[in-house]
Each structure stands twice: as C-alpha cells, then as structure tokens.
Amino acid sequence: MPSTESSNPPVVVRQARKQDVDTVLSLIAALADFEELPRPDEEARTRMTEHGFGAQPKFEVFLAEIEGKAVGYTISFETYSTFLARPTFYLEDLFVLPEYRKQKAGLALFKNCVRLARQRECGRMDWQVLDWNENAINFYDRLGAKRLKEWQPYRLGMDDLARLDG
C-alpha cells in the first residue's frame, strides 16, 4: 500500500521578497488567530514591512510553498553569544496554516533555519514555544531539541521601557 507521505506535493522554501509582504502579513494574522491574540494593526503592519523589507532589514522571512501557495513562514534574526563568541540564530516565528500541517512544511522551514545557522557558523539556534502548544512541543522533542530548564524568560514592554528610561 502506498504511503500517504510520498503522495504529498513537494514543499518549496524560499526567502520572501518585498512583493510578498501581503502574503507574509496574512500568515502573521493567521498565527495571531491561532494564538488567540489581536492581529497587528495598520501601524504595526507598516513597521513590519519596513523592518523586514526596508533598506536595513532587522529580520528575514522565509516562506514554505506547496503547489505555489504560501502555507507557512519563519521569521528569524541573529543575536550574539559572548561565551560562545559566535552568533545565535534566533527563530522568532515558525507557523504553518492548520490545513497544511502534516505535509512536511514545518519540517522544511525548520531545516532551512538549521541550514542557515550552520552556514553562518552560529553557535546555537534558539526559539520559544508556548507551554500549551503540545503539537509544537512534540515536534521539537522528536527532532531532539533540548528544553532549557535553567533559563527563565523575562520581558519589559513598551510602558516598562518608558518608565525605566524616564
């Protein structure tokens, strides 16, 4: 009996270009819906467009396409590890539209990040997973990713930054 995996159409991963902005923003809106968060407003969309596709990009976007349709994306950027004395590849978002999961788009996107991290001689690759997202946790566990137990995430929001800078 033929495997259903082999019958899946191939996944193509490519770097997003400025003309892909509407597609990228649509996928980001789908992620917001999935996480039950508000979608980026018009000002945020304008900033994301400039930050991702302007003269000095602050992040990069890769799209996963199946039969020419963008079905997922990653947003990533580099930070730096002083103790490794190497860049760290930081994966901010990895999202695949729910109806396209189990077709290897997430794996293709993740492996693209791994390839980029290795090409750039990064000392590590970091990301975060929401504690309720069992599918993502299981996906990363199957790949052999290590959960960091000794690190606690902290955050200052814009109001906190203004208060501390005042």
Image (tube, rainbow, N blue to C red):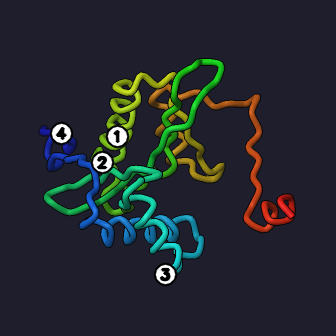
The Cα–Cα distance between marks 4 and 3, rounded to whole angstroms, is: 44 Å
Residue depth check, mark 2 versus mark 3: number of the one nearer the observer = 3
- What quarter of the picture does the N terminus occupy? top left
- The residue closer to the viewer here, 49 or 165, is 165
First of labels 2, 3 by sequence position = 3
The Cα–Cα distance between marks 2 and 3, rounded to whole angstroms, is: 28 Å
The disc labelled 2 sits on which kind of residue? Ala
- What quarter of the picture does the C terminus occupy? bottom right
- Where residue 97 sits: x, y (%)? 37, 62
Left or right position of 68 against 148: left
Q: Is there CB contact under 8 Å for labels 2 and 3?
A: no
Q: For the residue carrying disc 4, how many other residues have a C-alpha within 10 Å: few (<14), some (14-19), or many (20+)?
A: few
Secondary structure beneath label 2? helix
The disc labelled 1 sits on which kind of residue? Leu
- Where residue 44 sits: x, y (%)? 52, 73
Q: Which residue corresponds to mark 1?
A: 107
